[in-house]
Image (cartoon, helix red, strand yellow):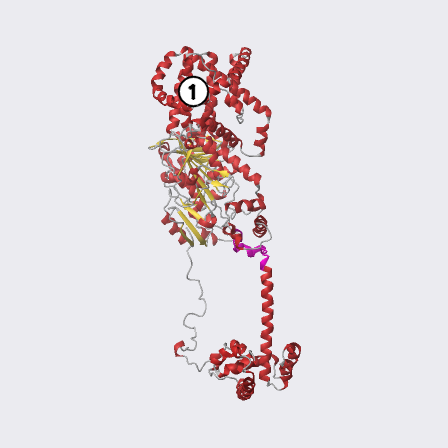
Amino acid sequence: MGQKRDFVDRPKRGPGRKTKKQGLPELPKQLKTEETKKKLGSRSRKRLVKRLRKQTELEQKKLIKKKQVAAAEDESDDENEEGDISSHSDSEDMEVTDGYTDDNKQWLKLSKKSFKKQGTHKQDDVSEDEDDSVEEEMEGGSSSDDDDDEMEDDFIGSDDDETNDDDDLLPVEKAAKKLQKKQKRDEHLAEAELQTNIAASEIYHLPSGQEITKEYILLQLAIFKGMTLSRKEYVNQLLKDMCLYYSYNNYLMMKLLDLFPQEIIEFLEANEAQRPITIRTNTLKTRRRDLAQALINRGVNLDPIGKWSKVGLVIYDSQVPIGATPEYLAGHYMLQGGSSFLPVMALAPQDNERILDMAAAPGGKTTYIGQLMHNTGMLFANDANKDRAKAIISNLHRMGITNCVVSNYDGRTYPKILIGFDRVLLDAPCSGTGVISKDPGVKTNKDEKDILRCSHLQKELILAAIDCCDANSKTGGYIVFSTCSVMVEENEWVIDYALKKRNVKLVPTGLDFGREGFMNFKEYRFHPSMKLTRRFYPHTHNLDGFFVAKLKKFSNRIPGQDKDKEDATEADAHLQETIGKNKKEDTDDSDNEEEKNKTMDVDSATSDGDDKNDDDDEEEEEDDDQEKEFGTGEDAVNRRRIPEFRGISVAVREKKNLKRKFKEQDEDNVSKKQKIVKSMTRSRHDAKISVKRNTTPRSSKKASNETPEASQSLKAFKTAQSVQSSSKTAKTAQHVKGIPKMPKTSQSVKVAPTPVSGSRKNDAQKRNTKKTVEKKKAPKTFTKKRKS
Amino acid sequence: MRPLTDEETVAVFEKLSKYIGENIRLLIDRPDGIYCFRLNNERVYYCSEELMKRAANISRDNLVNLGTCFGKFTKTRKFRLHITALDFLAPYAKGFGVTAKSTTDCRRVDPMTIVCFHQADIGEYVRNEETLT
């Protein structure tokens, strides 16, 4: 198909290999001699001669001086015996120089440089100085700068007593003196500098801008004493600087800093770099090895993506556009980020299953699911955006997936259309804070509102996804939730919400790398099983920032709705006074409860407590639940504060309670047979209860305390009932279902069952206590119903 | 989504028979289940019956794709095959063919020559993504 290269027409390039000229042979290093090192020029030779002459002169002079000094010392010897003890032990020279100056010391220190070069030891002291003087000469261009030296001496050297000796001194000595002075000056300066440095560092100011980025000062702030500002101010400064440098908005940077207190710079830097291009082999049409070979032949440089994937390839560079090769068009591979493999791998689709991809566009994950299912079973892909849904179709056809239906619904409405899926993948729309390298716009245009809006949408979607899934599926019942965001609000928070709202539990994702999800983060406290979720970061895994959580649905019941349904049916049942039906329901309930207990989540651990505290605990938990249901946004707070809602909810709840009481009374009156049947089952519980009743006197107390109130409301209800027809009440019951749940007031909770007179009282109490026993194990969302 | 009418069936099968002849039967009587043709938004889809039954829950407007799209009916009620049908036609294809000069030959022809030859190509997956189904 492709054209073949024409080798005939190509002209020769360059002069050819054999025409190259060889350079001169070089001696190997070990054979080179020292002599070849350096040859002196004529001028330098002259200078050498001069230097030697000077040297001899200097030596002579030294000798003369020594004699003079020795004579002087003899006189002063008696005066300072102590100081000379050490010097006496030393050689004669030292003694001599002692009274003279420290000059020599300075020289000695300095002249270490070029000792070896000069070779002879004698010359050392002087030669160094001369070297310097020579250098100076070079700079000045001639030896006339001796005058300059004198000039300088006049200016600076006023503190020394040697100014009068200047005339006697040789130029060498002058130079030496000059050098010495210079050194002193330097020393002074250095000292001054040092002091200023100390002063500056005592009040430590954080450097601004890039310098700071490499140091994690804020983590070990205690090291820096005498900080003038508080830690908060430094953090703010850091935040501002990073915002400026990496051009993020303040909110996002703050969030990221919370997420990555230590590795923030790594994360930000990783966001500046592009992730490598990765492709996924379509195993329906080819194998990875074949594909790799085909692409290598086209001049693509690639490698397997890693141990964790058998279908991924990383493209390093390519001579052809990767998205337009014949292999691509034939559907042999898909351009897809490495992180996009993860949710599908976590989903682990099996053959002949029904799988839903709720937010599918552009179909990368969908096609991966399709290929894992080997084109068997059914695959439903959905996307809310019709234009993006087109992209799914194109990809599906190209990849040869034939078992797929593409729909265009809002994901939140999907449970109304189709349910009963074995597995559901929800790659939820998100703020995209994990893929900043792909879309740098996120840096600036995401603020708190956007994050919370995403989070809210995700919560709705995940509930829909869970509702679509079938818990009774033989092979599945799994939901995988993933986002390309690193925000806790869009990840753990959403999962935590789902755990509370539906009968699901977290299960291991099956991905052996990645970081564990947060169990607590700042003000949030999540379910302990949250560590089963996985987080992926650009700086640690070289993948896009990603979050993957796998949920298993263990019951098809929806906690909140079921309860309302039961209430409604109970109300009907009461009005029609169909007691037999009640009995059925009761047994149903108990069945369900048992089922509940079997498939209990870890929630039970939290609600498990002493019998005494049971009631209170549960009240609190319920309140919490409802708080979470509304979220913590401002709207939710406002809604909660509206008194009308609260009033309605209280009234409604009272009514329900009363209805329940009626039902119980009726039961007691009529269904003695039931009791006999139930007593068989209860006998086991009764033993426990008899023990526990001693520890729980509260329930009976409560009942006696609140009877007047209850009887009042009972009256009110009776009057209301007389007005309403039966059909109407049924309607209100339905209406009740529609009203959003409001946080429970203590009043409504306290309404206790009416005490039953005589021997029945015992029975009623028994039932109450029995229910509290059951309550203990049941998840908290179900407690409201069993309160009475 | 609805089954094809008689005229539509005739149009589709006539077109298909040009490419795969008698093998059309094999498209419908498959060993792995019953497969059927369905029409939605003037496009003809080919899918298994089970999938079709499930997809019946999705309303006409919201159903974007079902199984494999074979082609579409034009406004003049002619049937056009899409490149997406290639996977199903290729295994049963008759020994039909068209001869043409290769692309390299076309490059060397007289500058005034008009070359026009196009049936379908896999590049359509990318180029005609919008109108593919």
Residue B4 in sight here:
no
Residue at image location 47% in from the left, 35% down from the top: A496
Question: Foreground: A126 or A583?
Answer: A126
Question: Foreground: A47 or A218?
Answer: A218
As drawn, A202 above or below A669: below
Q: Answer with left or right where residue A668 lies relative to residue A709.
A: left
As drawn, A79 above or below A777: below
Rendering coords of residue A262 (x, y %)? 49, 50
- Count up the numbered dots: 1
Residue A315 in sight here:
yes
Rendering coords of residue A382 (x, y %)? 47, 34
User: Mark 1 falls within which chain?
Assistant: A
Residue type at mark 1 is Asn
Residue B58 magenta-highlighted: no
Question: Foreground: A505 or A366?
Answer: A505
Q: Based on the displayed image, in which of its 4 quarters is residue A134 positioned? A: bottom right
Residue wearing tag 1: A768
Rendering coords of residue A615 (x, y %)? 46, 26
Say which element carries label 1: helix
As drawn, A631 above or below A660: below
Rendering coords of residue A547 (x, y %)? 46, 42
Please rate how many residues cluster around mark 1, counting C-alpha atoms within 10 Å: few if below 14, some from 14 to 19, many from 20.
Answer: some
Residue A210 magenta-highlighted: yes
Question: Foreground: A335 or A263?
Answer: A263
Q: Which residues are magenta?
A: A201-218
